[in-house]
Amino acid sequence: MENMKSLSNKSSFMYELNWELLWKYDKKEAKDIIDDYEEYFELGLLDGKSEEDICKELGSPLDLVRAIFPETTKFRRYINKKILHRFILAFVMLSIITYLIVTLDDNKHMVLTVCLLTPFVIIGLWTLFGDPLYSLSWFSSSESKKNLSKLLVYHLFHTLLILSLFWFMKFEILTWGIKKSPFGMEMFEIGPFVTNILYGIIIILISLLFFGVHKYIKTSIYYFSIIVHEIGIIGTIICYMNTMYKIDESSKYKEYVNLDLLPYLISIVIGGFYILYCNKLLKEVK
Amino acid sequence: MDAQFKKGILEMCILYSIYKEEMYGYDIMQKMSNLFPEVNESTFYSILRRLCGEGATEVYYGTTSNGPKRKYYRITSEGKKYLDTCINDWTKIKRIVSEIGIPSIARQDC
């Protein structure tokens, strides 16, 4: 892929450069390169050049990174140990949540839960095997019409995905509503009702996730980790509500409550550490 | 021109410039891009970094008249040795080329 576009000002150049360096190299080296280019800009401006001229001189940050580290062009650009490590963590966490929600939920919510969690599994697999950051950096530099149309297709796909999830959700509420009147709700009915609302929140979070990944490339890891964490919390609440509902319905589930909640709490703790880890990495780069 | 061959020549030019005069990165890159306008700046930067990484040059921080500290490059003793071999190789190639009798202007009739 030839990257011929040149950026028009310093901040966008440094932004792209930061992004290109973020995933690959140890922080010291990355900072060194960034400092060098800060200096270059500073001196170029003192020389009476405009930011645009300097950007034109320097060419694209991607070419720059390729020139500095020619060995990486032979391999897939963004697959290095650091990112693989990071996304294996994310993937494991998502898998745990998926597995737990699917296996521990009751049969009524089984189909919905599987539908809801499929995107997470897809994202997990995608991040692990699909070289997503390559496409992300491609998204960030989507300026030509060709790229925009591709971006539109992606957005359409994600919108359809989210809409279909909403449809499933609606279907779930409708069937539940027919069986039991939504008015005059009894104690044990509040459980699934709240659960459905929480599922809705999860769907919104998923759409936010896609939106954030597309829109705010720079903060996408941070964004990703926060939303995954929130989803984990809501998952816990859903599980809790479901078990509460089960207890009220029949008390034989009572003994499983702690067993149900423990794995969720563990996944939340893992999520928390994951966020700390991501933030630390980001801080180091900054 | 062959990329490796060109890179070798550029490397020698950069190293020699640093040998003659301690410079900061911006100066080196400006000077080089004036001399080789068709070469991208990132190429100079990558050569500069590599030379530094291999220990042929080293970095120190000095101040200029008009502002904050600047990163200067200077040649090391290792770098001087390396520059010598580069210059030897280069003169050897130049001699061979002239011995064969390749004219300095490209032939038009072949």
Image (cartoon, coloured by chain):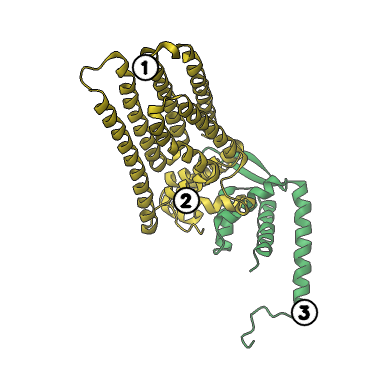
The three-letter code of the residue at mark 2 reads Asp
Question: Mark 1 and mark 3: span between their CA atoms?
Answer: 93 Å
Name the residue carrying label 1.
Answer: A245
**Residue A28 or A164: which is nearer the viewer?**
A164
For image coordinates 32% across by 16% down, the residue present is A188
Q: Nearer the viewer, residue A230 or A141?
A: A230
Residue A196 pos. (x, y %): 32, 26
Marks 2 and 3, how far apart in space?
45 Å
Q: Between A53 and A113, which is closer to the camera in this rendering?
A: A113
Disc 1 sits on a residue from what chain?
A
Q: Secondary structure at mark 3?
A: helix
Q: Are marks 2 and 3 in contact (CB under 8 Å)?
A: no
Residue A161 showing in the rendered view: yes
- Give left or right: position of B85 versus A100: right
Label 2: how many residues lie within 10 Å, few (<14), some (14-19) or many (20+)? Answer: few
Badge nearest the viewer, 1 or 3? 1
Q: Of tags 1 and 2, which is closer to the observer?
A: 1
In this rendering, is residue A81 above or below B22? above
Residue B100: give its label: 3
**Chain letter for the yellow part:** A
Q: Which residue is mark 2?
A: A47
